[in-house]
Image: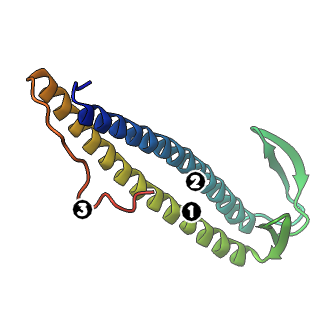
Amino acid sequence: MSSSPGGEEEVRRLLAAYQQYQAQADGIMRQLNLTQVAAEGLERASIAVEALDKSEAGQEMLVPIGSGSFIHATLASKEKVILNVGAGVSIEKTPAEAREILKVRKAEVQEGSRKLSEVLARIDQEMQKIQAVMQQFEEGEQAGEHQHLHLGGAGSEGVV
């Protein structure tokens, strides 16, 4: 650490900001993983609805029950698909309506993922700025210089 009191304070401030950005980045990465899981689930549901169109009532099939497990079942009807709309509420839709709803949901999840990726990129840029300033502090300390450097500037406001 720099021997100048102002330099030490600036280093502490930068380290705290870096740690805060790191925590935000970790949270966003977790959210991105969840959006990936949601998108995969929506894709599997879309594929299942497509397969329903090619099936016949009374046809024997394997129905996934989770964790790679299946049960044998007989298709009673291919006229309606039951979709979860949230808060424990489900609705019946035609396969065509279900496909459209699933398509819209998947697009929404992908848009959310895109926005999260943009925020993550901005956080990464801010972290890189902090690393560069810290490097300058370290180089200045090694050269015996004690400069007060300031991080900020255009584009650093408003990062979540």
Q: Nearer the viewer, mark 2 or mark 3?
A: 3
Q: Dot 3, how many residues are within 10 Å of its Cα: few (below 14), some (14-19), or many (20+)?
A: few
The amino acid type found where label 1 is placed reads: Val
Q: Name the amino acid type tagged 3.
A: Ala
- Mark 3 highlights which residue? 154
59 and 145: which is toward the camera: 145
Cβ atoms under marks 2 and 1 closer than 8 Å: yes
Residue 109 disc label: 1
Looking at the image, is mark 1 or mark 3 earlier in the sequence? Answer: 1
Q: Are marks 1 and 3 in contact (CB under 8 Å)?
A: no
User: Number of callouts in the render?
Assistant: 3
**Vertical comparison of 1 with 9: above or below:** above
The span from disc 2 to disc 3 (Cα, nearest Å) is 30 Å
Q: x%, y% of residue 80?
A: 83, 73
Q: Quadrant of the C terminus?
A: bottom left
Identity of the residue furthest to the front in this view = 5
Amino acid carrying mark 2 in the image: Thr
Query: How far apart are labels 1 and 3 at the CA level?
Result: 30 Å
Residue at the image position 79 percent from the left and 76 percent from the top:
93
